[in-house]
Image (cartoon, rainbow, N blue to C red):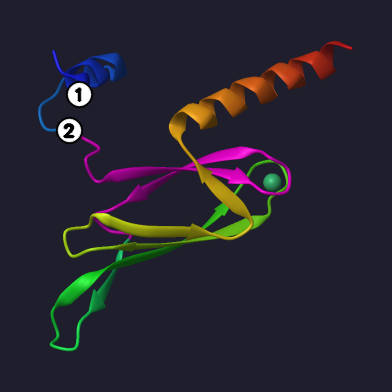
Amino acid sequence: MGIWERLKSALGGGSSGGSDRDGLYLYVRCGRCGDVVRVRVNLANELQQDFSDSGGISGYALRKVVIDATCFRPMPVDMTFDAGRRELSREIEGGEFVDQEAYEAIRAARSDADEGRAGS
Ligand SMILES: [Zn+2]
């Protein structure tokens, strides 16, 4: 049993053909308040085409502003992709990219802290 089958069954999706194969998830940590944000990018319709001099598609670019739910500071994200929509580079201002594990760990730590404050 592959990891994809296990993931799909864990998500409860039983139907054929991955329903979210166009989705790319970005995990961003705000450089000011430390909050983390998960953003879904739709690779099928959010990317802008870059054209080469010959008129063909040379790749894709994405510019997106991520805003966390704590201090609401906009963090502009710039990404580039090749003609096959594979990621080539990513940059962010005002924050940093983290992976899913770090995102979940930070969220768990922050919700613990919130509960602690509410109780005291
Ligand atoms: Zn923030």
Q: Quadrant of residue 37?
A: top right
Which kind of residue does numbered mark 2 sit on? Answer: Gly
The residue most toward the left is 16
Q: Residue at x 21, y 35 (%)?
A: 19
Ligand 1 is within 8 Å of the C-beta of the residue at disc 2: no
- In the rendered image, residue 44 lying in the magenta stretch gets the answer yes
Kindly identify which residue carries mark 1.
4
Magenta span of residues? 18-46
Q: Quadrant of residue 78?
A: bottom left
Which kind of residue does numbered mark 1 sit on? Answer: Trp
Left or right side of 110 for 25: left
- In contact (CB < 8 Å): disc 1 and disc 2: yes
Within 10 Å of disc 1 (Cα), the crowding (few <14, some 14-19, many 20+) is few
Identify whether 70 is placed above or below 91. above
Label 2 element class: loop
Identify whether 116 is placed above or below 83. above
Q: Residue at x 28, y 53 (%)?
A: 43
- In the rendered image, residue 25 lying in the magenta stretch gets the answer yes
The residue most toward the right is 120
Left or right side of 61 for 6: left
Q: Residue at x 51, y 46 (%)?
A: 97
Left or right side of 34 for 36: left
Identify whether 38 is placed above or below 87. above
Residue 84: x and y, percent?
16, 59
Kindly identify which residue carries mark 2.
18
Q: Residue at x 55, y 53 (%)?
A: 66
Residue 87: x and y, percent?
29, 55
